């Protein structure tokens, strides 16, 4: 079928279509996301025309691209969806919950198909035979029986099943029948297609009239040529049937402006045409479908060439597309820019440092310029970082669908409220926070929200509400997952903790009790469900958020619900740090984790058994870590300094006092990944380059707190 | 050098068409829908308009009708790209004053072939 593969045919003009694949994949992904969003929000009783049109357009657009770029399976499925959506927007069918379910499942299958193509066609093809049949049943209005089965099927397999059986793609064929004594005989083939839905679709290419006893049809089918020919011989002799790949069509309206003067009669179905009397069309007649068409409006009864078809949609009030005001660039380019700005920040700091050692006159001259440079560098850095910022709505958008499927599975009724979707967060952060948030939302739905009957019995509305809220607070973003479910039970948590052998005295504060759910292997669910897993998760959630430099807070009121607040830094690439000196070395502490610093006398540090040492800070004894010993900093020349400074840092709910020689200052540092550039180093989360060109290690305060516990 | 106005709401289709035409030596201006195309058509001249049919804001048929009302575009070839090869669609294009149609999917070679027939 090389003729239907655009890539091969386009060799003539030397254009490799694969260069457009990436844009197509991104565009198709956006279209599918929009479609899903609209399907989820559609009001079945009063579906808006513009909504239906917009959903149709999503499928239509994906189909057009898929067909052009040669993704036959995607084109076949979207073709079937488009047919159903077309009937919906024309009000030939009323939308139903069953249709929405099937269309959502089809969207999932399309995503799987696209992912497979994007990875170069690896893995098994997606089996869409069942979906195609379901959609077709709706299209034909025969879905009464199928419809009842549909939601169950869709719920049972929310993700498309993958089978090793390759589904051959939809093929477009031209069927030529004749010459026949009675050309109307060919109509029996049309009936054949309506009798056997699996055959695909057929439509006349000749407006229903024969030319010298020859009839022409367009077929869209997944069947093989031989199967088709075998079937056709029941109605028409085999020698009178010819199947050829349908060439991409075009045509001119004879007489239209610019249409060619004479069309050579080479291609039986060139797939294009001119209108005879249209402005710019060629003056003399054209061949093939063009001439047929020119005659059609004059002779075909009921044809209304004047009035615009109802298919032409009203000019809608859709918000203008952002395509002409936005630019799509690869993330690599942005990251390269960020790296370069990082280098610039370092160079600027280096210049500032060096200018101090220059002589006074020169230093004066340079000062003004350096101040400007510093301001511009900072502005540039902020501007570049903002390119990487994307709205939280990109994370939130997955939850309506997730909750819909989950609530259906659990027989619960849940509404999702989103607040602050426009709040922006660094792209790298967004990718990493998605999984933990998903877990929290699943947890709320599974363990928090009660069954409808139970809620009613407690005087609550039947629908539970899960609220996702994002907001900026200082240099952080706070994402809250809140539900109005049953909340946490203090007694149950304490009992569970003790069963697991966790030390849980009654004197624990509520906050400490709630935090027990983050303990490894802790699960309070009486029944283990396949939704929230087997108690794996909350500890992982906490660990992942902590790894991002974030914190988690829980608040709960029994009977009224609970709230989990995740606080994250806005970006991972730049950090506010405090630099401290130890021996000849400089280390960076994340400013957010620094609580206080003070000078101590050596004798206020008390030894515990073994190597352990503590210092008394007001009423509290705190473990002390000697950074010099942790990192084996060599002492050159002078002996132990007496100028002891303690920096108290907090992480993972614990505090540790770090003993250093001096505080060097506070500054923004550009974080360089140590693992990527060197290897993982214990107690160190990254590195940065200082103004004087030296490399400084950024300390992992959580690891230091853990170390102090041992 | 001939100038072509290429209209499609799909970025991948627009890129493919635009790249193909530029490769063939045409000057190309892209528009993301009928409304955008109409505004661009008002501000400069084109030798050919190539438009998708189904688009938000203003579709290809309405664009064709509006362009034909404009004296500047009375005789300019207008081709409609469409996935529907039904007579209904063709007649709608014809009624709006389109010069011809090209059925999607098409490949770059076919596009150049068709354009070669109307731009000489």
Image: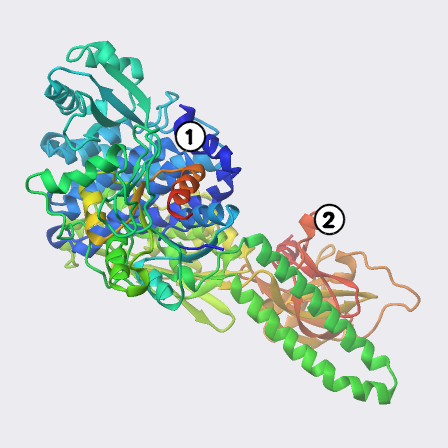
Tell me the SS state at disc 1. Answer: loop
Relative placement, left or right, of A35 versus A506 is left
Q: Classify mark 1: residues with Cα within 10 Å, few (<14), some (14-19) or many (20+).
A: some
Q: Classify mark 2: residues with Cα within 10 Å, few (<14), some (14-19) or many (20+).
A: few
Is residue A603 visible in the rendered image? The answer is: no
Chain bearing tag 1 is A
Give coordinates of residue A703: x percent, y percent. 63, 55
Q: Nearer the viewer, residue A651 or A334?
A: A334
Give coordinates of residue B60: x percent, y percent. 28, 53
Callout in the foreground (2, 1): 1
Mark 2 and mark 1: span between their CA atoms? Answer: 47 Å
Vertical placement of B12 versus A300: above or below? below
Taking the view exactly as shown, the residue that stands out farthest to the right is A637
Relative placement, left or right, of A593 versus A183 is right
In the picture of the structure, the residue carrying the numbered disc 1 is A5
Q: Tell me, what colour scheme is on the image?
A: rainbow
Q: Nearer the viewer, residue A530 or B74?
A: B74
Vertical placement of A85 versus A1: above or below? below
Chain bearing tag 2 is A
Which image quarter: residue A235?
top left
In the picture of the structure, the residue carrying the numbered disc 2 is A678
Give coordinates of residue A379: x percent, y percent. 60, 75
Is residue B43 visible in the rendered image? The answer is: yes
Tell me the SS state at disc 2. Answer: loop
Which image quarter: residue A232?
top left
């Amino acid at each position: 079928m090389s003729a239907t593969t655009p890539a091969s045919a386009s060799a003539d003009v030397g254009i490799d279509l694969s260069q457009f694949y990436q844009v197509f994949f991104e565009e198709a992904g956006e279209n599918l996301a929009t479609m899903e969003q609209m399907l989820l929000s559609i009001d079945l009783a009063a579906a808006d025309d513009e909504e239906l049109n917009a959903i149709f357009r999503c499928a239509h657009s994906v189909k057009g691209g898929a067909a052009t770029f040669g993704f036959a399976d995607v084109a076949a499925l979207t073709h079937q969806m488009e047919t159903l959506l077309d009937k919906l927007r024309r009000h030939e069918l009323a939308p139903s919950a069953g249709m929405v379910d099937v269309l959502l499942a089809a969207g999932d299958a399309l995503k799987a198909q696209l992912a497979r193509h994007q990875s170069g066609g690896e893995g098994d093809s997606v089996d869409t035979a069942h979906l195609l049949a379901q959609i077709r049943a709706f299209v034909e209005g025969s879905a009464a029986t199928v419809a009842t089965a549909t939601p169950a099927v869709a719920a049972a397999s929310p993700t498309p099943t993958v089978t090793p059986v390759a589904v051959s793609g939809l093929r477009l064929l031209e069927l030529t029948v004749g010459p026949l004594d009675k050309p109307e005989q060919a109509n029996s083939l049309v009936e054949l297609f309506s009798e056997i839905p699996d055959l695909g679709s057929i439509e006349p290419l000749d407006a229903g009239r024969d030319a010298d006893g020859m009839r022409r049809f367009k077929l869209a089918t997944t069947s093989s040529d031989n199967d088709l020919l075998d079937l056709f011989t029941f109605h028409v002799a085999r020698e009178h049937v010819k199947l050829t790949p349908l060439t991409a069509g075009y045509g001119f309206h004879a007489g239209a402006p610019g249409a060619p003067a004479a069309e050579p009669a080479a291609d039986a179905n060139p797939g294009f045409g001119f209108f005879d009397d249209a402005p710019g069309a060629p003056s003399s007649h054209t061949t093939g479908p063009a001439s047929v068409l020119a005659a059609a409006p004059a002779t075909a009864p009921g044809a209304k060439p004047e009035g615009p078809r109802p298919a032409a949609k009203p000019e809608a009030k859709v918000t203008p597309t952002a395509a002409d005001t936005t630019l799509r660039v690869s993330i690599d380019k942005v990251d390269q820019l960020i790296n370069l700005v990082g280098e610039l920040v370092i160079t600027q700091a280096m210049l500032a440092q060096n200018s101090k050692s220059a002589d006074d006159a020169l230093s004066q001259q340079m000062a003004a310029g350096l101040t400007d440079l510093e301001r511009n560098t900072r502005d540039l850095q902020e501007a570049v970082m903002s390119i990487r910022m994307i709205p939280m709505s990109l994370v939130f958008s997955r939850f309506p669908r997730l909750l819909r499927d989950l609530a259906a599975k659990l027989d619960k009724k849940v509404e999702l409220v989103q607040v602050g979707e426009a709040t922006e967060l660094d792209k790298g952060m967004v990718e990493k926070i998605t999984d933990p948030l998903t877990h929290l939302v699943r947890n709320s739905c599974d363990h928090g929200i009660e069954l409808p009957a139970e809620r009613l019995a407690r005087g609550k509305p039947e629908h539970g509400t899960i609220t996702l809220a994002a907001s900026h607070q200082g240099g952080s973003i706070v994402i809250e997952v809140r539900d109005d479910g049953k909340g946490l039970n203090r007694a149950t948590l304490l009992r569970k903790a003790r069963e697991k052998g966790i030390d849980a005295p009654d004197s624990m504060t509520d906050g400490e009790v709630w935090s027990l759910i983050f303990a490894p292997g802790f699960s309070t669910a009486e029944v283990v469900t396949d939704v929230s897993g087997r108690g794996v998760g909350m500890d992982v959630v906490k660990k992942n958020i902590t790894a991002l430099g974030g914190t988690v807070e829980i608040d709960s009121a029994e009977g009224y619900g609970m709230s989990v607040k995740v606080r994250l830094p806005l970006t991972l690439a730049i950090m506010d740090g405090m630099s401290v000196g130890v021996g000849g070395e400089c280390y960076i502490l994340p400013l957010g984790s620094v609580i206080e610093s003070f000078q101590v006398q050596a004798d206020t540090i008390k030894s515990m058994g073994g190597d352990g040492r503590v210092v008394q800070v007001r009423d509290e004894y705190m473990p002390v870590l000697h950074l010099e010993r942790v990192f084996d900093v060599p002492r050159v020349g002078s002996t132990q300094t007496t100028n002891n400074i303690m920096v108290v840092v907090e992480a993972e709910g614990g505090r540790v006092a770090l003993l250093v020689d001096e505080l060097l200052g506070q500054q923004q540092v550009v974080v360089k990944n140590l693992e990527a550039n060197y290897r993982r180093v214990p107690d160190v989360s990254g590195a940065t380059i200082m103004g004087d060109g030296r490399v400084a290690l950024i300390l992992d305060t959580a690891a230091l707190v853990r170390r102090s516990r041992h | 050098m001939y100038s072509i106005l290429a209209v499609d709401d799909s970025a991948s289709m627009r890129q493919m068409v635009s790249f193909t035409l530029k490769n063939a030596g045409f000057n190309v201006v892209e528009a993301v829908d009928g409304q955008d195309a109409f505004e661009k058509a008002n501000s400069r001249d084109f030798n050919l308009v190539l438009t998708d049919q189904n688009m938000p804001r203003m579709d290809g048929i309405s664009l064709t009708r509006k362009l034909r009302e404009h004296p500047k575009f009375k005789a300019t070839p207008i081709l409609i790209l469409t996935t529907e090869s039904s007579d209904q669609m063709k007649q709608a294009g014809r009624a709006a004053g389109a010069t011809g149609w090209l059925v999607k999917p098409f490949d770059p070679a076919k596009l150049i072939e068709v354009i070669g027939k109307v731009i000489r």
